[in-house]
Amino acid sequence: MGPPRGTPPGPGFVPREQCWRCRKAREKCVCATVPRVENRTALIVLQHKTERRHPLGSVRLLRLGLARARVEIAFQESVPPLALPAGAALLYPAPGARDLASLGPDERPAALVVLDGTWSQAKRMFRESPWLQALPRFLVTPRAPGRYRIRTEPSPRHVSTLEAVVLALLQLEPDTPGLLGLVTAFDQMIEAQVQHMPAELRPPPSPPPERLRGP
């Protein structure tokens, strides 16, 4: 049995080398698996303060891969980021949200604000942020259960932040190359963790990312 959690390391402790880009241990670095995606729709991720250090958070892959993406930490939910791009909208399944698949070309938002955290945290951020409630609201409809195989979601229709963003960009700019490569990188990150689980407890693999484009 190891020392109690929170016990200071001993004199012989050597910290693991960390990748400064993905913030993972060097032997688990995911940078080489993440494609560079030249997205046209700007992305602003409003991340709950407890989610930013989660070792399997999907937002780090979005920040590495998307050319137009920034992450803001929601230390105070009621305070908006310093500036939002013109034409920004909220990607969140709140009442009144329209499905992105139903929009015409002239109705598509120029930028998306996305909430990152557990679903209860996302609900709180939305509830306590009048500036979020004032934005136009859009949603995506997943065609398959979420791929976050080691984190429990409220229902099969709830997906990770990365999946929601990719689904949205597939609707808004389906000609942009590399979007499904982000999902592949996410799958590889999760699979690496699954391999540390006992064989009898490992969840089944996710379907190929290509399924996200259609049935």
Image (cartoon, rainbow, N blue to C red):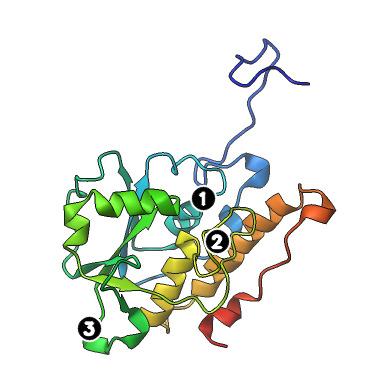
Q: Residue at x 20, y 45 (%)?
A: 78
- Judging by the rendered image, the residue that carries numbered circle 1 is 57
Residue shown at the point (35%, 56%) measured from the top left: 115
Q: Quadrant of residue 84?
A: bottom left
Q: Is residue 111 left or right of residue 3?
A: left
Q: Residues within 10 Å of mark 3 (few under 14, many from 20)?
A: few
- Report x, y in % for residue 183: 56, 67
Determine whether label 3 and label 1 are within 8 Å by CB. no
* Disc 1 and disc 2 in contact, CB within 8 angstroms: no
Question: In the picture, which quadrant includes the N terminus?
Answer: top right
Q: Mark 1: few, some, or many residues within 10 Å (few <14, many ≥20)? A: many
Instruction: For marks 3 and 2, give the CA distance.
Output: 30 Å
Q: In front: 105, or 145?
A: 145
Which amino acid type corresponds to the residue marked 2 in the rendered image?
Answer: Val
Q: In what element is the residue under mark 1?
A: loop
- Chain-order first, disc 3 or disc 2: 2
Q: Is residue 139 above or below residue 161?
A: below
Residue 109 figure quarter: bottom left
**Rendered residue at 45%/54% (across/down):** 59
The answer to whether residue 197 is visible is: yes
Relative to 215, say whether 196 is above or below. Answer: above
- Would you name the residue on which mark 2 appears? 34
Query: Dot 2 lies on which element?
Result: loop
Helix, strand or loop for disc 3: helix
Q: What residue is pinned by disc 3?
A: 107
Left or right of 30 on screen, residue 83: left
Give the residue drawn at x 26%, y 45%: 77
Q: Nearer the viewer, mark 1 or mark 2?
A: 1
Q: Is residue 112 left or right of residue 201?
A: left
Question: Residue 58's spot in the image, x, y percent?
Answer: 50, 55
The image position of residue 44, as x and y in percent, is 31, 58
